[in-house]
Image: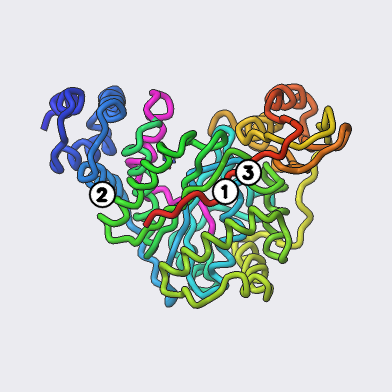
């Protein structure tokens, strides 16, 4: 097969055959197809799309570029994936809660790049906790604790690892079939029996419009169906940060609050909704996650999950040397708290990284003391910026410019859970 013929076929709006897809993905993984050729093909796919059959085949080829984990456990396995948002720490309370309900949750996660945080970065705020586990350690922990949140093993969909890095620098990330196949190849290779996807919509999300998010959700659910993995997608609002905490240690603290029966209402609502969907995919729909949470078993599982990976669940979390408050300029109602602005502010404070080799400041982040719809008075603290590097405060404040608005009428809050696609 000729790489140039495959590029030309997609450039001219054609449909790729299964044989062409298998060949080009495999040859790219082995270094036979060059980066510049794959860039051209990715751009042709971005411009001309791939249909459902091509997308499912592309996903299979990416799965087959590496190993599939076989997670032998006596419990039904189910996983969750979020397309990424600001303050999205839901995996932290969700994985131990669903495990406490009787399922096994293998969560192979990533680090953050850009303004949406990474689950592993958050957990690394906990003293001693380690993200890197062998396949055997993952299987053992899944059996003994029921929940594992760790780094993806290097041989899980290596084609995606290579292609995602290339898309990142060639303006070809924003393609629904490429995003959907990228996410699903990793999740299916991980071997979970069911998948619940949290597709975020709004300023702080990858997908800014509901139409785009719906298209991505439909593609994700379609790939799951083609591969025999029951998949449900929730469309959820990301125009406002989730919860009050945005960063690393601050998000761990908020997650622990939720597991102890407190925490912000939106974080609890989304955790419960996702838990119910996960339990329904595993045949455990008679278990009520709210009851399990109230019993403290979710928190107990959290402590065991953290300890199993070397972490001390009771250790104090890192705190920041510099704290700056942003106060309300006038009396009124908070009408807007832009998730993107808050995400960029937290990132500039050091919570996120600009290049993948950069370290993160685990203590850095933003605490939101008010949410849209809340009545505020002049001088009242709205946000708290935290960092270990005082020089970042100016840039963080600049990012928030225009992102916090006060008016005199109550703002209409969009529903958190917009729709469920099965
Ligand atoms: N997340 C992924 O894993 N892949 C993409 O292509 C985009 C977001």
> x and y percent of residue 397 in the render?
74, 25
> x and y percent of residue 147 in the render?
53, 65
Horizontal arrangement in the rendering, residue 45 relative to residue 263 (left or right): left
Horizontal arrangement in the rendering, residue 351 relative to residue 10 (left or right): right
Mark 1 and mark 3: span between their CA atoms?
Answer: 6 Å
Q: Of circles 2 and 3, which is in front?
A: 3
Ligand 1 under 8 Å from disc 1 Cβ: no
Quadrant field for ligand 1 = top left
Q: Nearer the viewer, residue 337 or 24?
A: 337
In the image, residue 56 lies in the stretch drawn in magenta: no
- Callouts 1 and 3 close, C-beta under 8 Å: yes
Mark 2 and mark 3: span between their CA atoms?
Answer: 40 Å
- Callouts 1 and 2 close, C-beta under 8 Å: no
Using the image, tell me which numbered label, if any, was put on residue 415: 1
Circle 3 sits on which residue? 413
> x and y percent of residue 299 in the render?
67, 68
Q: Of circles 1 and 2, which is in front?
A: 1
Mark 1 surroundings: few (<14), some (14-19) or many (≥20) residues within 10 A: few
Note whether 306 is above or below 25 in the view shown. below
| Displayed quadrant of residue 19 | top left
Q: Residue furthest front?
A: 409
Q: Is residue 203 visible?
A: yes
Mark 1 or mark 2: whose residue is earlier in sequence: 2
Circle 2 sits on which residue? 60
Marks counted in the figure total 3
Which element is circle 3 on? loop
Where are the magenta residues, as a range? 149-172
């Amino acid at each position: 097969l000729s790489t140039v013929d495959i590029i030309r076929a997609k450039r001219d709006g054609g449909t790729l055959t299964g044989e062409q897809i298998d060949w080009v993905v495999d040859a790219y993984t082995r270094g036979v197809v060059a980066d510049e050729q794959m860039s051209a093909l990715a751009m042709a796919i971005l411009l001309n799309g791939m249909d459902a059959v091509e997308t499912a085949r592309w996903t299979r080829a990416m799965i087959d570029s590496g190993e599939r984990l076989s997670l032998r456990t006596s419990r039904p396995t189910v996983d969750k994936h979020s397309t990424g948002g600001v303050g999205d720490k839901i995996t932290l309370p969700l994985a131990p809660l669903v495990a406490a309900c009787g399922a096994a949750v293998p969560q192979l996660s990533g680090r953050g790049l850009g303004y949406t945080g990474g689950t592993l970065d958050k957990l690394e705020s906990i003293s001693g906790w380690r993200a890197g586990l062998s396949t055997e350690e993952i299987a053992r922990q899944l059996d003994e604790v029921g929940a594992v949140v760790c780094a993806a093993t290097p041989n899980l969909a290596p084609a995606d690892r290579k292609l995602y890095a290339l898309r990142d620098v060639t303006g070809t990330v924003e393609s629904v079939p490429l995003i959907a196949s990228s996410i699903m190849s990793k999740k299916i290779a991980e071997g979970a029996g069911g998948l619940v996807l949290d597709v975020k919509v709004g300023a702080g999300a990858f997908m800014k419009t509901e139409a785009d998010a719906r298209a991505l959700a439909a593609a994700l659910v379609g790939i799951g169906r083609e591969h025999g993995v029951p998949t449900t997608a929730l469309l959820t609002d990301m125009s406002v940060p989730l919860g009050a905490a945005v960063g690393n240690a601050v998000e761990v603290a908020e997650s622990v609050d939720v597991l102890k029966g407190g925490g912000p209402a939106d974080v609890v609502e989304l955790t419960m909704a996702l838990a119910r969907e996960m339990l329904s995919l595993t045949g455990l729909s008679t278990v009520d996650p709210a009851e399990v949470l109230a019993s403290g078993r979710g928190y107990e599982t959290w402590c065991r999950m953290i300890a199993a990976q070397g972490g001390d669940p009771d250790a104090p979390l890192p705190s920041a040397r510099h704290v700056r408050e942003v106060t309300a300029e006038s009396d009124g109602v908070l009408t807007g708290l832009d998730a993107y602005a808050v995400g960029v502010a937290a990132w500039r404070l050091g919570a996120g990284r600009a290049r993948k080799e950069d370290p993160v400041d685990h203590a850095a982040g933003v605490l939101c003391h008010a949410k849209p719809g809340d009545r505020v008075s002049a001088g009242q603290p709205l946000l708290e910026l935290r960092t270990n590097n005082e020089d970042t405060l100016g840039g963080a404040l600049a990012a928030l410019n225009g992102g916090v608005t006060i008016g005199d009428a109550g703002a209409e809050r969009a529903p958190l859970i917009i729709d469920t696609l099965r």
